[in-house]
Image: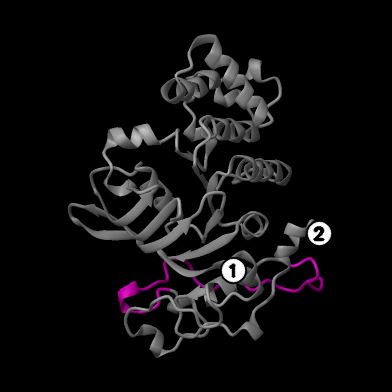
């Protein structure tokens, strides 16, 4: 049994006097212990809403959820608030996208870290402060004892992100959800953060759900990849099969729009046309059809299911998947080999 098994997760935002908006529409995936699974897609595809639903952090009013999210045999979507509070921070933790808005601006970093240690590990006073300093040192924050007394605005963006990671790993959680942990950081700090997460998975056996739009991050870190579009998984495969031969036109377009170092000077990029707003309801066909260069009327004839057109384990939600011979075989995988 996987540590986390998400089955047909749906999240719909409701409101009086306005139409319902379905942000997540039947998403399914699983994460095993010690595995890194990626959720990939452009802004608005439902990645962050999926993570917030799993953590039980969506509002109780105006939101309707469905499906199942079994974590170690317990359905996260049906747990009480008190049960979720006992679980969050101890066995299930999350690194949020924006550390400046995620940290309390009027509370010192040390107090925010020790709060978790007191709540879930029973540490208090000097013992809690010593462990908090150890956690900050573990994530690479220099002079951790002094940093415990500082406020979030006194730290750099990279240090704030490291402080969030220290809080997330304080109780050695079994599952860590990282929502765009490298956003707005320079490439050097990004590499350090990713190396830190990789060490956590390797040394602690933590399962990691990586939510990102950066395919370079996916290539260097993830074992399995789920590509989301308009709230649904449109392609799911291992990292190498996906990058070697993306089968869904959306995933194919994402890889094709990445600049190549070996491309001739002045060669234009090939972005995906349109925007995330150019979509149709999944019940009417493929939501990506208005932006797809390969669509036919067959793409607009009802629900499209995930299939395995080319090889076992490589699932695609598409009527006309891209043949392997036309796949880009993208160079981004070279990052994994240190090239």
- The segment highlighted magenta reads 260-287
Regarding mark 1 in the picture, which secondary structure is present there?
helix
Q: Quadrant of residue 7?
A: bottom left
Looking at marks 2 and 1 on the same chain, the residue that comes earlier in the sequence is marked by 1
Dot 1 surroundings within 10 Å: few (below 14), some, or many (20 or more)?
A: many
Q: Quadrant of the C terminus?
A: bottom right
Above or below 198: residue 90:
above
Residue at x-position 53% and y-position 77%: 312
The residue nearer to you, when weighing 308 against 280, is 308
In this view, which residue lies farthest toward the bottom?
A: 297
Regarding mark 2 in the picture, which secondary structure is present there?
loop
Q: Position of residue 119 (x, y in %)?
A: 41, 23
- Whether the magenta-drawn stretch holds residue 253 is answered as no
Above or below 70: residue 277:
below
Q: Mark 2 points at which residue?
A: 339
Inspect this view and state whether residue 248 appears: yes
Q: Position of residue 86 (x, y in %)?
A: 36, 32
Q: Do the residues labelled 2 and 1 touch (CB within 8 Å)?
A: no
Q: Mark 1 points at which residue?
A: 254
Q: Label 2, label 1: how many angstroms apart (C-alpha)?
A: 21 Å
């Amino acid at each position: 049994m996987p540590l986390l098994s998400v089955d047909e997760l749906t999240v719909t935002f409701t409101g009086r006097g306005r139409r319902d908006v379905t942000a997540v529409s039947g998403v399914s995936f699983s994460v095993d212990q010690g595995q890194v699974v990626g959720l990939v897609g452009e802004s608005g595809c439902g990645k962050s809403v999926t993570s917030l639903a799993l953590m039980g952090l969506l509002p109780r009013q105006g939101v309707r959820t469905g499906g199942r999210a079994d974590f170690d045999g317990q359905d996260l979507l049906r747990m009480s608030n008190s049960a979720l509070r006992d679980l969050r921070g101890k066995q299930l933790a999350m690194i949020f996208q924006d550390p400046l808005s995620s940290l309390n601006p009027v509370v010192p970093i040390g107090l925010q870290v020790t709060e978790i240690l007191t709540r879930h590990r029973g540490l208090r006073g000097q013992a809690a402060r010593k462990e908090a300093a150890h956690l900050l040192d573990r994530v690479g924050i220099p002079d951790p004892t002094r940093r415990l007394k500082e406020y979030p605005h006194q730290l750099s963006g990279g240090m704030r992100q490291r402080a969030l990671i220290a809080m997330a790993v304080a109780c050695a959680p079994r599952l860590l959800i990282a929502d765009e942990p490298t956003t707005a950081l320079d490439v050097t700090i990004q590499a350090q953060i990713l190396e830190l997460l990789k060490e956590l998975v390797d040394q602690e056996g933590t399962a990691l759900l990586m939510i990102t739009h950066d395919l370079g991050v996916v290539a260097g870190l993830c074992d399995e990849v789920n590509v989301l579009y308009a709230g649904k998984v449109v392609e799911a495969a291992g990292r190498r099969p996906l990058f070697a031969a993306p089968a869904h036109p959306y995933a194919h377009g994402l890889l094709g729009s990445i600049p190549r170092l070996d491309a001739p000077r002045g060669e234009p990029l090939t972005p995906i046309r349109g925007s995330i707003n150019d979509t149709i309801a999944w019940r009417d066909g493929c939501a990506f059809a208005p932006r797809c260069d390969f669509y036919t009327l067959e793409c607009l004839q009802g629900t499209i299911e995930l299939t395995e057109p080319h090889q076992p384990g490589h699932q695609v939600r598409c009527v006309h998947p891209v043949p392997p011979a036309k796949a880009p075989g993208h160079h981004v995988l070279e990052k994994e080999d240190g090239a």
